[in-house]
Amino acid sequence: MPLIDAQSLDPPASTTTAPSSDSSPGNDDSSPSTTTPSPSLPPESSSSPPAAINSDHARSESTSERESSPSPSPISSSSPPNSPSPSPNNSAASQAQQSPEANNPQLQPNTRHQMTTRLKNNITKPNRRYGFVTTIPPFTQVEPRTLNQALRTQHWRNSMSTKIDAQIAHRTWDLVPRTPGQNVIETKWIYRIKQLVDGSLDKYKSRLVARGFNQKQGIDFGETYSPVIKATSTRAILKVAVSKDWCLRQLDVNNAFLQGTLDEDVYVTQPPGFIDPDRPDHVCKLRKALYGLKQAPRAWYMELKRYLLQAGFKNSMADTSLFIMNQKGLLIYVLVYVDDIIVTGNNKSAVEAVITNLANRFSFKDMGALSYFLGIEVIRTSKGLHLNQRKYILDLLAKMNMADAKPVQTPMATSPKLTLTGDPHSNPTEYRTLIGSLQYLSFTRLDVAYVVYKLSQYMQFPTTDHWQAAKRVLRYLAGTATHGLFISKSNNLNVHGFTDADWGGDKDNYVSTNAYIVYLGDQPISWQSRKQKGVARSSTEAEYRAVANTAAEIQWVCSLLSELGIAPTATPAIYCDNIGATYLCANPVFHSRMKHIALDYHFVRELV
């Protein structure tokens, strides 16, 4: 079966709950919308070549509709055209003709609606009905920065003692004499106050970490790479689980890095505040990894991977942090993001057995049904799954002192265009911190994906214009904090994508920008907006490159679905609004004009 369908396919409408921006990522430099309209496809013609890319004429149709529709008449306070205009000569006569009510205020009709509001009654306390949407109760306690500050409070002393007991129970280290030439890494305590979704206290968390920046490669660390689950994989699996009404369970690993075995000899100092009085000059030779070590995430991942492979799971080739059990009709998926794990499958008792076996091997905290994962609130209803990052947004607004910011309707202004020129921002670190925080919102917010990508281009030398644009994103988020992604139940698990390109839209170097949204059924699961490599000589070339990038993403999604045991019922399709790119994908007639295009983009022809 070919990867991309050469037939026309009417794409379903999106079911996301986040509002779309007022333009699409095309020639007007805007973000991909969270709600993508179905394109109006042209009628099939025998003269047109079959192609995977379907031409979209929705723009011209919508434009003609706007031009043909009458514009609303403005409201005017002037007199009607046929009525005589007042003049000084007849002003006295007009006053004489006024009714008695005009000179008596008590007889005049009252046109104001006497509404009783909370403000008129001097009620300034927020309404509890809107507390979920507007704010989270602030947590007033301050996290200690040093050991001396933590030792003044009993709950922090208890937290550190609990952590040391866990280290001893896991036999994390052995005390050995210090020898000359040892690279001994210092340790320190980190303190965090963990909160629940509603902002209330969860627990006081102390963590003993190693100063891994003092490690030397080849001596006390080697391989350091550790994969995490991709956002696209997570959204795709959630879509499958919701559509098939599977259970979704969440696990939190206790002291995850302490359960990873080290292959190198690593020495650290004794924990501050817990030095052995009989052997104060000894150092700790680590058996297990500590947080802060360069190889700690990889050590934990390899330990978990070995166990899951022995238990009958297979490591996904499309995403190495995904483990799949597919045996005799039994399907179970395990998604790993460091120490946060999601387990789902088509057999609830088998899922429970997997969780029990994991708990017997590792120290886990069973969080029950999936509700809060990596800062994402998950609300499951009979119609589907709603994902939002409300708490993350409100915390970010409070951190940037914009909790009371006035909301705006769009995340990005249409003009002026952002460029490299301008007055330098006084605090570049503040700008980089904000953009880094906004990047994490792209998991559920398609409506800010493009503007965050655009602002990320100016991390090195941000200007005041860039800073104002970033603050506008915060103002937009202040009014849409509860918006997110809704994953609906659907039997349609076919793949299709929309692609577009902004030809030469960058005002600094005239490089084109491409964007795509890939759908699984009616659900967007993958989206991206990125600059192209090199300058495109025509809009057809820019669109053709965008199609090639979209085809590569769809090919990867199809590989993932194949490993998940999901077989789409229709061939994937890509929708494009450039007829030249459509012909170029299916017909090499333009080869003489397009011979300068890199050969790797032409692989899309093999998929048609």
Image: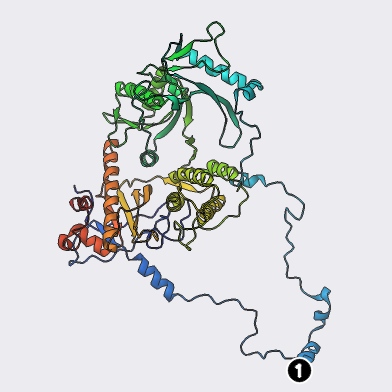
Percent x, y of residue 562: 26, 39
Does residue 18 show up? yes
Q: Residue at x 30, y 51 (%)?
A: 496
- Residue 487, compared with residue 326, is above or below; it is below
Percent x, y of residue 426: 55, 49
Q: Secondary structure at mark 1?
A: helix
Q: Residue at x 32, y 52 (%)?
A: 497
User: What amino acid is at disc 1?
Assistant: Asn
Percent x, y of residue 441: 47, 45
Which residue is labeled 1 in the image?
89
Q: How many marks?
A: 1
Does residue 16 show up? no
Q: How is the image coloured?
A: rainbow
Which of the two residues, 94 or 213, is positioned nearer the viewer here?
Answer: 213
Q: In the image, is 402 to the left or to the right of 595?
A: right
Percent x, y of residue 229: 37, 35
